[in-house]
Amino acid sequence: MAMQPVEAEDRVGQMLAEIERAIGVTLDHGRPGLAARVKNRAARRLAPALRAGSPPARLDQLLNHREAAVRDIGAVLLAECRYPRVERLERARVLSLDDDWEVREWAAGPLRESVRDDLGSGLTALVAVGGRVRRAAVLVARDLVLERVLDAEQARRVADAVVDDPDAHVRKTVGRFFLGDTVSRRYPAAMASWLRKRARDRQVSEAFWKNVTDLVSAAAVRGHGGEFRGAITALISAASPPRVMARLRAFMMEEQDG
């Protein structure tokens, strides 16, 4: 028998109260909160009641809750709900600006679902925003590369858009995680080709070189060392900064010893 709206509202309220009590007695990352598996389980339990009750109002209550862990749960549900794409995208964008770092991480889920069917303009628009939204967009791009939704050329366009960003939060996501562990794992030949092309640029940013240092430390690049050897040689020839040069030469020596 389908859950009635009034019953659904009561059920959501009860589960939300349970979640709030659990947050008060458990720790996650050294602070009051819930582990990721608990948040995902809570979202699965809440989903049927949300669908039967007043989904937009109740979901907004979760997304605006004072507890970061509840906002995380809201992010999971936002990714799965049938909100109009534009409304879901706007709510996800707000989550990506949250003061809590973990909420910003969970925002990648609804952002990903919002742009999945509109990669041409949707993902490009997110990447263009900058700051915390751009970092979230990089996480989205990472997930879509791993799913092979983004092809090699699309991944390279995202790389071009973010690799020179000086924002430390963006850069921490770009070098090792997006370029190194993700694009280089899925599309090593395309990534090596992109690096050779960038090495020929006359004006290369400091952020680019920092990302290169992170990239060559990634396990995926080491696993495809043969394909990257020519690209690393080109980068060494591009008058890279001394610290970066030392890291690139160390990479080449490790490859030869291997």
Image (cartoon, rainbow, N blue to C red):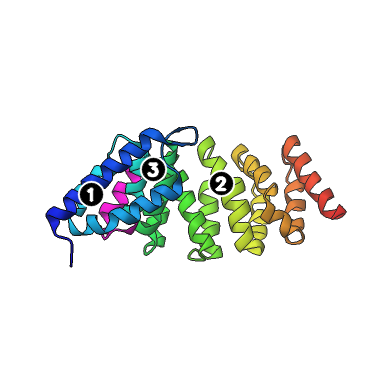
Image location of residue 234, percent across then percent down = 74, 52
In this view, 51 is above or below 108? below
Image location of residue 104, percent across then percent down = 41, 42
Image location of residue 206, percent across then percent down = 62, 37
Disc 3 versus disc 2: distance between alpha carbons? Answer: 16 Å
Which label number is shown at residue 12? 1
In terms of sequence position, does the residue under pointer 1 or pointer 2 come before the other?
1
Which residue matches tag 2?
Answer: 174
In this view, 103 is above or below 119? above
Q: Mark 1 belongs to which amino acid?
A: Val
Q: Nearer the viewer, residue 1 or 232?
A: 1
Which residue matches tag 3?
Answer: 96
Instruction: Magenta stretch: give its range.
Output: 79-94
Classify 10 Å Cα crowding around label 3: few (below 14), some (14-19), many (20 and above): many
Q: What residue lies at 81% left-to-right and 54% top-to-bottom?
A: 255
Q: What residue lies at 67% left-to-right and 58% top-to-bottom?
A: 192
Classify 10 Å Cα crowding around label 2: few (below 14), some (14-19), many (20 and above): many
